[in-house]
Image (cartoon, rainbow, N blue to C red):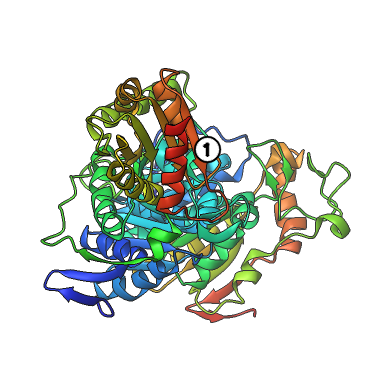
Amino acid sequence: MKTTKSGYRRPASLTKAPMHYCAGCGHSTAHKLLAEVLDELEISERTIGVAPVGCAVLAYFYLKCDIAEAAHGRTPAVATGIKRALPDRIVFSYQGDGDLAAIGLAETIHAANRGEQITVVFINNTVYGMTGGQMAPTTLVGQVTATSPSGRESATMGGPLRMCELLNTLDQPYYIERVALDSHAGVLATKKALRTAFQAQVEGRGYSFVEILSACPTYFHRSPLESLKFVGGEMAKQFPVRIFRKEGVALHA
Amino acid sequence: MKGAVTVESKRVLMTGNEAAAEAAIRAGCQCYFGYPITPQNELIAYMAKHMPAHGRVFIQAESELAAISMVFGASLAGARAMTSSSSPGISLKQEGISYLAGCQLPAVIINVQRGGPGLGNIDPAQGDYFQATKGGGHGDYHIIVLAPASVQEMHDMTFQAFDLADQYRIPVMILADGRVGQMMEPIRLQEGPAPIPPAKPWALTGAKGRAPQCIRSLFLEEGALEKHNLALQECYRRIAAADTKLEETHTADCEWLIAAWGTCGRIGKGAVQKARAQGIKAGLIRPLTLWPFPYERLARLGAQVKALLVVEMNCGQMLEDVRLAVNGATPVHFSGYPGGRVPTVSDVFNALTALVRQ
């Protein structure tokens, strides 16, 4: 973050378009951090992003780099195709929980298992935002959504998928970290994780994955402030914030 | 080309599946993504062996969905990309094909058809005509569909498919069947340097020295999707005008016309020759492009002949396009072989002579 006497500055890799995200949504912060990392690593002119189907489908309005739109869940497969065709470019996918952990679970696991030289940015806010707050694969047990109106019941709906833990069972990933956009410290940690992940790709180290616990006040049915507490509290309890894989070595296997 | 038997100086003996794979390599296919399914397995195995040897990309994907999405990614990055499968796998690829069509991305897709619906069987079939020519996936689009009847055509059409795909920024499907895919025939390979693809300023290669670009099929702005779809239709009209291809045999004076595609077209040609030998003025029309379909030529031939006989290894799919073209001017009869049976020349000849006797 460039701070001058006049304060915070818009990253060069972020457009001036007003974001369509709801008040308190984590996507806007994640976008800004991503743009800052592209700036700092000076890679925006050789970066190609892949946007998901979900709230971030319009990422190309906000990020000043080439962006492709994938079919729902196929995001890492599309990123694989781009990276294999253009191995000297920086390729990332930006995905929500439905895209990454439900419909695109196979693509997620297999791209990681092949050790594709891509960076996957995973926004986990435990709900389908774009379609109206339905249950996601990461919805907490008991959490009320449009399709779990009495709360998610693990006996019939399963429990929340822990993606970092799942991917950490694989041999090939180089870097896996979970962070939470729940506080100022969380924002800084998220920035650092994104930077580490992209740096790994710049150096050709391998597959990197950053899960960002993120607020969706609209479908948490909470105020933005209460939503941040939920992210840092109940969500972080279910999804521990930590580095899982560093330089190819599993830290919490 | 290890394993291929050279039968004379410039001809080699190959299966159709291998011939298609070798054609893709010779056409400059940079990325191949596939998933095993019978009866196209020789193709993916050939690519697994030869693509890396040429310094190109080969991935056995986790699914057909992933394979076509990898094609989507490689294509939007400007590479010549291909996938292959057979009927049930092609159903899965329809998602990606719709996105390719919506994003106007070139790609080559080979369908070595087997029986259906469902798992069907692994025998040759032509049951995917509707799926291939009428869109297949969701939305209002077409792809170019080429129908090979021989191993040579499997090779030549696959080679040409890359240029067509790049020229029009459209997916091109080779609609073969298990017989064409697995049969071995001596063929002449495409020689010379690989064709140079046109410049692709639309490709996403990183925004160095230009404004960032986006490849998308989502058009939320009012009127934008209508405009986009009308532009696609305009492209389809150009393709239909310039690249509708067909083969005719003895049509100049024919009174009885067989219309058939792919394997059935080849068998139909044998039936026409047999009929001619017996003094029956038979002819054959074999569309080489199933989309665009040769409606105009068929309409003219329909006005000339006493009756048409459509022969397909299905329950009557191209039949509907033939009837549209002829528009009631002439009786259109059908001889169908669903379920994996390949008709013999005698089968088709007998169906034709039954018409003549009526």
**What amino acid is found at the position of numbered circle 1 in the picture?**
Gly
* Residue name at image x 37 percent, y 65 percent: B183
Inspect this view and state whether residue B61 appears: yes
Quarter of the view holding residue B48? bottom left
B98 left or right, relative to B143: right
- The correct choice, above or below, for A220 with respect to A176 in the image is above
Residue A208 is situated, as x and y percent measured from the top left of the image, at: 48, 67
Label 1: few (<14), some (14–19) or many (≥20) C-alpha neighbours in 10 Å: many
- The correct choice, above or below, for A172 with respect to B177 in the image is below
Chain under label 1? Answer: B
Residue A88 is situated, as x and y percent measured from the top left of the image, at: 28, 63
Quarter of the view holding residue A234? bottom right
Near-viewer residue (A155 or B285): B285
Label 1 sits on a secondary structure element that is: loop
Residue A123 is situated, as x and y percent measured from the top left of the image, at: 59, 52
* Residue name at image x 75 percent, y 42 percent: A220
Near-viewer residue (A87 or A226): A87
Residue annotated with mark 1:
B316
Near-viewer residue (A68 or B94): B94
> How many numbered circles does the render carry?
1
**Split into 4 quadrants, where in the image is the C terminus of chain A?**
bottom right
Residue B187 is situated, as x and y percent measured from the top left of the image, at: 22, 64
Inspect this view and state whether residue B218 appears: no
* Residue name at image x 37 percent, y 37 percent: B258
* Residue name at image x 43 percent, y 39 percent: B353
Near-viewer residue (B72 or A53): B72
